[in-house]
Image (cartoon, rainbow, N blue to C red):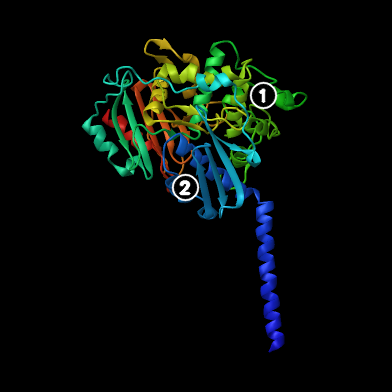
Amino acid sequence: MRLVLRLVRFFLVFVVLVLIACLVWLYVAPPALLRVGSGYAAKIVCSNVFLAGRESAEVLSEDVQAPGHPLLRLMRVAVDRDAGRVHAAILGAIAPATAVYREGFGCALLADGKTPARLPTAAASAEAPAKAPVDTKALWPEGETVVTRPDIGDILSRDDLTGPGLRAVVVVKDGRIVGERYGQGFDGRMPLLGWSMTKSVNAALVATMIRDGRMTLADKGLFGAWKGDERADITLAQLLAMESGLAFNEDYGAVADVTRMLFLEPDMAGFAASLPLARTPGTGFHYSSGTAMLLSRLWMDRFTEKAEALAYPRKALFEPLGMASAVMELDETGTFAGSSYMYATARDWARFGLVLAKRGEWQGRSILPPHLVADMSQENATSGGRYSRMQTWLARQRTGEGAFRAVVPQDQFALEGHDGQSVTVIPSKGLVVVRLGLTPAAKGYRSDALVAALLKAL
């Protein structure tokens, strides 16, 4: 009996030592998966607290834990509002991550808790929020007054059309908002994350650089690290069309290139530029957030002063369009995260959609070159009609079980982002439909049926 008790005690001590060793290991050298989870939590909470004005507990519960990996339920966050920092870690100590808020530029993750890159002193003032429209009683977009149509309101009241997790939907017809709806706890003043819709905004910035002669679609030899290998043959046009041939794993369900880039790498564009070719440039379509980060670095590098580059999105797009709420966030090194991180109110996302619907024209002024806006509805060479030449998705070739198969206008295209974000643009119909929410792909929702119902009504 004594022998059995000794063996039991030995076993229990052994188990305790193993558990202690595991905890020490997780604390000292946490696996990448855990660090991705903490980075995601810190970044999402930080941006929603300091940009959207939401409560941290609500963001942690609704945005991070509810739709995410079971391990995220163990995540704890601490917000230091005075310092503009958010700390996240599993059980409060394992795999810690820190995100920092920089005025005018949103939040960025810090590698190993380091001090963020110092931004030029002129940049913050240049990137201050744009002024609101002078006459708020004027009709949108000159002001903020909206006259909604009852029939459009009836369509937007249907949960099967607007989808689960709805946060905002705005419908623009012939330059005016004709209907809008907001989810519980959200309103028209709250900036919302567009995720990959940011890619299309980033492409618009590239378009303005091409217009001004700072870049051309035929540009090659784009990065110094690519000299001497086949990557030097990649053109700017191939990057815009997602036909670069560069390797990039876009699987959000694991520690893949995209999650490593967004949540572990301080220099996102540098990481994307380091990846090898997977195929000959121009021979295949491969959707890649890394490609969008390369585009950000390329257009920013065309400026001799960093402050000019940091001020450019607001100067070139946001101020002319009256997008007072729009903030495109930076990575730690100060490169715009043009793949994923732009916040704006639903109405400001609608402003961007409207300038695209008008082929780059805004209140009598040319904001974007019309031929490059037209390329947003023209398919690239290798996607089978799914993707355009300018970082947008096309609807007319969608197939598959449960997919929307109705004939759609030939000029229809869409900005689309993770978890159900979309801005559908149909220039020939004067229609823009913004739909924002927290709707994981597993729920099977697409905005196609909503757009079809609106097309029929309008």
Residue visible at 41% across and 33% down in the picture:
191
> Measured from the top left, where is residue 347 in percent x and y?
36, 28
Compare marks 2 and 1 and give the one earlier in the sequence. 2
Residue visible at 42% across and 47% down in the picture:
58
> Measured from the top left, where is residue 245 in percent x and y?
65, 31
> Measured from the top left, where is residue 2 in percent x and y?
70, 87
> Measured from the top left, where is residue 133 in percent x and y?
34, 19
Secondary structure at numbered mark 1: loop
Which residue bears the numbered disc 1? Answer: 234
Which residue bears the numbered disc 2? Answer: 60
Kindly report the distance in space between the C-alpha atoms of the residues bearing marks 2 and 1. Answer: 41 Å
Position of 40 compared to 440: left or right? right
* Residue sitting nearer the eye, 183 or 442: 183
Q: Residue furthest left?
A: 150
Determine which quarter of the picture holds residue 171: top left
Position of 234 compared to 135: left or right? right
The tag on residue 354 is none
Determine which quarter of the picture holds residue 446: top left
